[in-house]
Amino acid sequence: MSNANVALAQSLYAAFGRDDIATIVGAMASDVTWEVVGRAKDYPLLGVRKGQDGVREFFRLIGELQEVVAFAPRDFHASGDMVFVLGSEGWKLRKTGKPVDTEWVHVFTIKGGNVTAFREFTDTAQFAEAYRG
């Protein structure tokens, strides 16, 4: 199952690259938990969202708040029903024009061919600082 889970995660990054959010949302379990670890009061994308509507809202906010400069998932590792992805990203925040350039780790939990949980660990201080201007 690990190879299928890695392939699913890779397909979601490819969909993001095409701005195909419907494909991403369609791969989520109806009760998915989507989290970017951090405090929403520091930056609106941080925190926990629930369900497919929460994931859809997350990607809507990305488009509203950030302009992609670079986004590169690099390393994929599977263990049981989890896929760990290491990568980097660069953004320009629309509100302030400030850049964010950071490394991240994404953790997908995949059961029955659907993502049941997603967690992102990134440099939230950079996002908060750039957002404040």
Image (tube, helix red, strand yellow):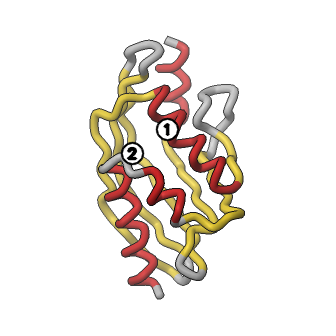
Q: Residue at x 50, y 80 (%)?
A: 79
> Dot 1, crowdedness within 10 Å: few (<14), some or many (≥20)?
some
CB atoms of marks 2 and 1 within 8 Å: yes
Q: Give the distance between the C-alpha atoms of the residues marked 2 and 1, in whole angstroms.
A: 7 Å
Task: Give the SS element for disc 2.
Answer: strand
Give the percent coordinates (x, y) of residue 47.
67, 41
Position of 60 relative to 37 (above/below): above
In terms of depth relative to the viewer, which is nearer, 64 or 105?
64
User: Tag count in the figure?
Assistant: 2
Q: Residue at x 44, y 59 (%)?
A: 23
Give the percent coordinates (x, y) of residue 58.
57, 42
Q: Of callouts 2 and 1, which one flags the residue occurring earlier in the amino acid sequence? A: 2
Q: Which mark is residue 83?
A: none
Task: Give the SS element for disc 1.
Answer: loop
Identity of the residue furthest to the bottom in this view: 1
Q: Callout 1, which amino acid?
A: Asp
Give the percent coordinates (x, y) of residue 74.
30, 59
Q: Residue at x 62, y 63 (%)?
A: 117
Q: Callout 2, which amino acid?
A: Glu
Q: Residue at x 54, y 83 (%)?
A: 80
Is 66 left or right of 124, judged from the image as shown? left
User: Which residue lies under the disc numbered 2?
Assistant: 103
User: Which residue lies under the disc numbered 1?
Assistant: 123
In terms of depth relative to the viewer, which is nearer, 29 or 48?
29
Position of 1 relative to 37 (above/below): below
Is 122 left or right of 3, judged from the image as shown? right
Give the percent coordinates (x, y) of residue 76.
37, 69
Is 31 left or right of 90, judged from the image as shown? right
> Dot 2, crowdedness within 10 Å: few (<14), some or many (≥20)?
some
Position of 31 relative to 46 (above/below): below
